[in-house]
Image (tube, grey):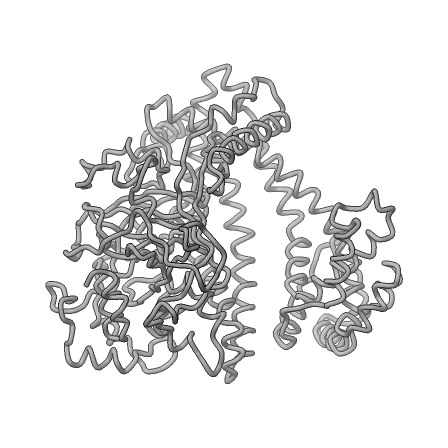
Amino acid sequence: MVKRLTTTILALAAIGAGAHFAFTDEGQWTPDQIGRLNLHRAGLSIPVEQIFNPGGPGIHEATLRLGGGTGEFVSPEGLIMTNHHVAFGAVASIATAEQDYITDGYLARTREEEIRARGYTARMVQLYEDVTARVLSGVREGMSFEERREAIRTATEAVVDEARREHPDLEISISAFSYGNAFKLVGFKMIRDIRIVYVPPFSVGNYGADTDNWMFPRHTGDFSFLRAYVAPDGSPAPYNRENVPYRPRSWLKVASRAPEEGDFVFMLGFPGSTMRYLDSYYVAYERACRLPYQIMILGERIDVMRRAWEGDRELQIRFATTVKSLANVHKNYQGKVVGIDRMDLVARKQVEEAAWTGWYSSQPELKRRYDGVLEALERIYAGMREDDPFLLTAGELLYSPIQSYALNLYEYLLQMEIPEERRGTNYRGEQAEQRKERLLEGPAGYYQPVDHELYLRAAVRGLALPEGQKIATLQHIVEGQELQGYAPALSRAIDEAYASSPLLSPDGRERLLALSADEAADRGGLFLRIAADLRDRRNELNERRQARNRDLARLRQLYAEGIMALRQQQGKMLYPDANRSLRFSYGYVRGYEPKDAVYIKPLTHLKGVMEKETGEGEFIVPEVLQQAWRSRAFGRWADASGDVPVNLLTNCDTTGGSSGSPVMNARGELVGINFDRVWEATVNDYNFDPEFGRNISVHMHYIIFICEVFGASNVVSELGF
């Protein structure tokens, strides 16, 4: 009786004060929710309509979806500010050992010197409409999930077609929210000509690198400037030297007063994804299976690539973007594991689920709809755990461009043995010919020493697969060997494969493409034999995974629907999980206590940059910046402490994709640019923790100070100083 009463009290507490059942200032709110937040009580001093104004210019139009992050217009001439790490791919693509723009940075002093940022597109929201009622208009009670999905697809196509006719100049799409329970129509204006204006030296833009990544105190100048160009008539156009700078209707102005602790701030951006409304079984799976495995694999890849590039600047440039990305995710996942344990998040979500179950169980109609959802989710994750060993090992082997190529070639040969009308759509007619031409070109993008070592590690782990999942070719190589002989035997076989594989020569590829699939597997060496081993088993498990994903989509839709119904009954507003759409977040400049008796202040200064300086590795301070420090040449960029502020903490709600988001004060003026979270906040993707939820931004004073110190006076002038 006591145990049951305790459980009931905990469940009721979760309804009143749980992480997602209670209203807090956390939230990545959609634009149409902004007006329902009590922002003026929170500290906002401008009309809400200035933030989101779907009928005309507003701050939302100055905020751009850019690359994998966010950017913002900061001048009437299309100047865009974003993070150094968001623009990093653009500068890395033009860097060479002779013109090392990664190390030295790049500055275009004139418009003519602005270099194309290849692969970068900027999108701004110019149309935003809740179309949930229209999209769900064909959904009827009693429909199966497949019927529901088809009704949604049909309605979505009709709504999109109509919007495209009305707005032919916009990129139109419909985004699903809350796991298919709400839908928004979004129209983006696309700008396809983006150019590099100023990227600071790596020692500024990535100061502290992996050591300081996800950490605070932080002293990183993670910013860059790009520019948007359009055709002379103002229409979006691909890169062309005749294009002119885009003139936005809205752009952000830098605040005249520096932010202080306790100041109200807000952000707009395009956060990638959060998983806050998923179930306890998902979090348990992440903690026990996916995250630990990925931490191990990512760590290996980083280590192997770094050892390979030692003393070779060309290789460092080649792998720079890959290693930077891998290291970022690696440390993020480590923080997530610590955060899940610190919050006892699985147990916390179980309490929330008990509260939800107790709520719907008292209402017969709801009980019929939601009963069994959680039990079905538990079964799905149990099945995933069973299949994971093989799928993860196959994924490791296929990380090799050569093994991936071998699987593609083997699949092509299998498809060619089938009558054309029964082949996959990508293996018919002209598409089949194009595929063959690409296969004749061979595997690309691999560096053999790295590929070889990672492949060997994956193969060794493949030998430990459980019965029924073993890879025949690997087992054959070590047949009769003692355990300690496995690695040498595999290493010899893999050495031979790299030395003699016909996949790596034009003549060899041409000969293989003239054979049947079985003949190619027999004569094509190790990579093709393993491709044959992987193909059927992987396809079988992928079919099971796809079936599970369909079930997950159905169950998550029901679970989210149920949570939304509970919240609506309580009269509370629910923000949806992030999905790369435009979001609003607000908070305050605020420090935090990562450990007992340790308080981290929310502002760092140039003094801290110099305290970390070692002259090597991740903590090199360029001489020109050292000279500015020695001479105290801070000008108007010093704050009340007499030093230049570098980074600041706020408790806004961010995640991946929020990088580059503008941080604005109560008057809508720019005070910083978001670039990271503290390590303790990486778990916020699963559950927002107000105690540790802090994001890190570059202070605008430091950005302009760096521009002045490194001679980017044209950028400073364009910012209005």
Q: Residue 506, located in which quarter of the rendered image?
A: bottom right
As drawn, the residue found furthest toward the bottom would be: 311
The answer to which of 124 and 371 lies nearer the viewer is: 124
The answer to which of 276 and 628 lies nearer the viewer is: 628
As drawn, the residue found furthest toward the top would be: 364
Q: Residue 626, located in which quarter of the rendered image?
A: bottom left
Confirm whether residue 547 shows in the render. Answer: yes
Residue at position x 53%, y 72% in the image: 319
Residue 288 higher or lower than 606, as above or below = above
Residue at position x 42%, y 74% in the image: 102
Residue 231 higher or lower than 575, as above or below = below
Q: Position of residue 537 (x, y in %)?
A: 76, 51
The answer to which of 532 and 170 lies nearer the viewer is: 170
Confirm whether residue 463 shows in the render. Answer: no
Q: Position of residue 445 (x, y in %)?
A: 63, 69
Residue at position x 25%, y 45% in the image: 587
Q: Position of residue 417 (x, y in %)?
A: 87, 52
Image quarter of the N terminus? top left
Image quarter of the C terminus? bottom left
Residue 473 higher or lower than 135, as above or below = below
Q: Position of residue 28 (x, y in %)?
A: 36, 42
Residue 94 higher or lower than 328, as above or below = below
